[in-house]
Image: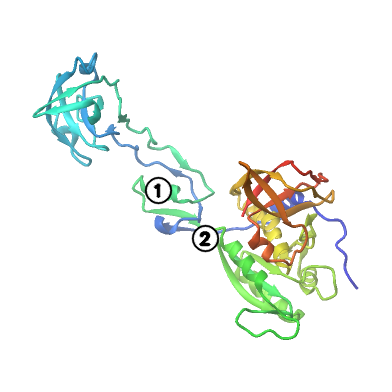
Amino acid sequence: MPKLLGSLTSIPEAVEKASKMISISLGVRRVEIVDAQDLILARDFHAVIDQPRFDRSSVDGYAVRSIDLVGASINNPVVLRVKGLIKPGDDPSKYVVGPGEAVEIHTGAPLPPGSDAVVMYEDTRRINDEVEVYRPVPRYGNVSRRAEDFHRGELLLKAPRILKPWDIGIIAANGVGEVEVYEPLRIGLIITGSEVYEPGHPLRGSGLYNSTGYLVWKTLESMGFTRVHYYGVFHDDTDLLKEALTRALQDNHVVVTTGGTSVSDGDLVRDIVEDLGEWIVRGVAMRPGRPTSIGLINGKPVFLLSGYPVAAWTGLEALVKPAIYRVLGLEEPAKPMVKAVLKVKLPNVVGYRSYIRVRVWEEDGKLVAEPYMLKGSGILSSLVKSNGYIVIPENTEGFMEGELVDVYLL
């Protein structure tokens, strides 16, 4: 007979329970920085040099003594003798700037001794070995000071942190070619259902293609620091599923399943988790995706998602990804969000956090949002044809027409 879900757990409570009961230990490895993007930094990174390492010009012009240019103007130019040219990479000590002297300098080149400012080409006129200067510059004007970007020993990247291109850039700026990161999070993915067929194979009877599995697979991979081991589609056979789940738990840090998590007698994954382990969360107060659950088997988490694609996607966004970030001590990346005016009334069932797909567009100079579909956890095209979603909190009866709401962009 059916095993009803009973009391549902709120999304915040579910994530909190997961963070307390799940422990994931990732190994540390040293990789070349070119391979480190989207992996998790394992050790705090401190600057090993000053950046810049010296005072340098931030413009093309002439290195000068600022005191020599006091009172310079169009009608009263200061004339300086040009001693030479310094380019980036040159030894700055090749010239010393004395009273009434200047050195032509390119952007990024080190300031020669004696100079303390740079006047731009646009404020000068060159006449053979002399230059007329038409504007004063303050001390260190147009100069990037030593260590103004960062200084040696400064904490630049605090672990754990998902490394982005700019992080790789700042590591490279220190002359460091390798960095310590955590190994990727290995996730085993198991798809269940006798009616489910892989793309490329002929359908039989009332079968359907495995769209949910690929949606989940690629969503998990998009986190960057994950490596998904796809085990394929398993028909509703308890022994086969138990064997697959056991193997996936041995090979991975986390296992995710789709299908077989609801309340009917045919939902085998639910029964296997109950047989082999325990529940962290059994059913969550969200729409769609109420049967979404988290089990714990031999100390490893199993996330059970709906077999319906939209409900599975909601489970990923609302529970799986936030829980993984929390367990690993990571800050969850901010989702792109805009404010938009709701075109129609949007009701909610109090006690449930609802995820509503919407279309957003500009109308009369402002952004407006309209629900694409209020129901239909199996309508995959609703994700393709919408470009955002609205989250209605558990304690809210809904939003009114004309209300300004937050829309998270897809």
Secondary structure, mark 1, is: helix
Q: Quadrant of residue 295?
A: bottom right
Q: Residue at x 72, y 77 (%)?
A: 241
From the viewer's perspective, is residue 315 above or below residue 194?
A: above
Q: Residue furthest left?
A: 128
How many marks are shown on the rendered structure?
2
The amino acid pointed to by label 2 is Glu
Q: Quadrant of residue 191?
A: bottom right
Q: Nearer the viewer, residue 57 or 231?
A: 57
From the viewer's perspective, is residue 121 above or below residue 170?
A: above
| Residue that label 2 marks | 183
- Quarter placement of the C terminus: bottom right
| Residue that label 1 marks | 169
Q: Alpha-carbon neighbours of circle 1 within 10 Å: few (<14), some, or many (≥20)?
A: few
Q: Residue at x 67, y 56 (%)?
A: 317
Q: Nearer the viewer, residue 115 or 363?
A: 363
Q: Quadrant of residue 34?
A: bottom left
Secondary structure, mark 2, is: loop
